[in-house]
Image (cartoon, coloured by chain):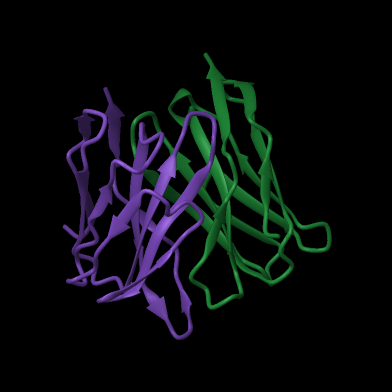
């Protein structure tokens, strides 16, 4: 089955630690995205990548870092510089058609809690 | 700038129709989407509409687009308790197509 997976589902971290969230897709999609979701709010874009070895900052990139070494993988590192990291993190991917991108497919999410 | 707005809550009785509304600001929108999110899960694409269409129907779902007023709605016929979820409106703008703007989501409560 094709899809997008995220791991772990729940993650606990002590203050001052970096932590990496995994996102993998086998849909052969070109673009991948990381969003943050806080209670009662919509999705805010952290980083996105349209092609391997390239990525751009979204609206709230400070305190986060990403890499895109393989088409199917787009891990997100939440660094100790992120002041309020407790949130639900969603990864998504989309296929490129010409100069635009189709609808985004989402993973199941990772809930990060900083203790 | 680009913005998508939705009301935060909607409550309906089982069997009634639900109508979730959304307004957007970017007139260059190419695609408009409705996603559903159940508790603790990711977003699931329900349906989408091209900006040159007025209406799209898919089983119990009807999407209406008023491009002049930049208004999008999702009607769910015969609403069931399993429809209780958060519904997100989203638009993809005509700026290279890579950016999708999401609304804050409408939480639908279905009373039995």
In the image, is B73 to the left or to the right of A81?
A: right
Chain in green colour: B
Give coordinates of residue B58: x percent, y percent.
53, 53
Give coordinates of residue B110: x percent, y percent.
54, 21
From what the image shows, is residue B109 above or below residue A54? Answer: above
Please tell me which residue is depicted at 65% across the width and 38% down the height of the picture: B20
Please tell me which residue is depicted at 39% across the width and 64% down the height of the picture: A48
> Residue A65 appears in which quarter of the rendering?
bottom left
Give coordinates of residue A79: x percent, y percent.
28, 45
Q: How many marks?
A: 0
| Residue furthest to the top | B112
> Residue A51 appears in which quarter of the rendering?
bottom left
| Residue furthest to the bottom | A98
Chain in purple colour: A
Q: Quadrant of the N terminus of chain A?
A: bottom left
Q: Nearer the viewer, residue A12 or B60?
A: A12
Q: Nearer the viewer, residue B27 or B13?
A: B27
């Amino acid at each position: 089955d094709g899809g997008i997976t995220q791991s772990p589902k729940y993650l606990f971290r002590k203050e001052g630690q970096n932590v990496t969230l995994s996102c993998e897709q086998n849909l052969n999609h070109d673009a991948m995205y990381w969003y943050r979701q806080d209670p009662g709010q919509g999705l805010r874009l952290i980083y996105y990548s349209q092609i391997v070895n390239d990525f751009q900052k979204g609206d709230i990139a400070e305190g986060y870092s990403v890499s895109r070494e393989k088409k199917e993988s787009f891990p997100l590192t939440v660094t100790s510089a992120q002041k309020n990291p407790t949130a639900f993190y969603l990864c998504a991917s989309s296929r490129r058609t010409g100069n635009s991108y189709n609808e985004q497919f989402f993973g199941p999410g990772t809930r990060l809690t900083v203790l | 700038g680009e913005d998508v707005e939705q009301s935060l809550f909607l409550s309906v009785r089982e069997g009634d129709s639900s109508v979730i509304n959304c307004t957007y600001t970017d007139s260059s929108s190419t695609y408009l989407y409705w996603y559903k999110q159940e508790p603790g899960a990711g977003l699931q694409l329900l349906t989408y509409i091209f900006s040159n269409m007025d209406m799209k129907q898919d089983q119990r779902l009807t999407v209406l687009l008023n491009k002049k007023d930049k208004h999008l709605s999702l009607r769910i016929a015969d609403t069931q308790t399993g429809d209780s979820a958060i519904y997100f409106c989203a638009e993809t703008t005509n700026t290279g197509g890579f950016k999708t703007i999401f609304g804050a989501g409408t939480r639908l409560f279905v009373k039995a």
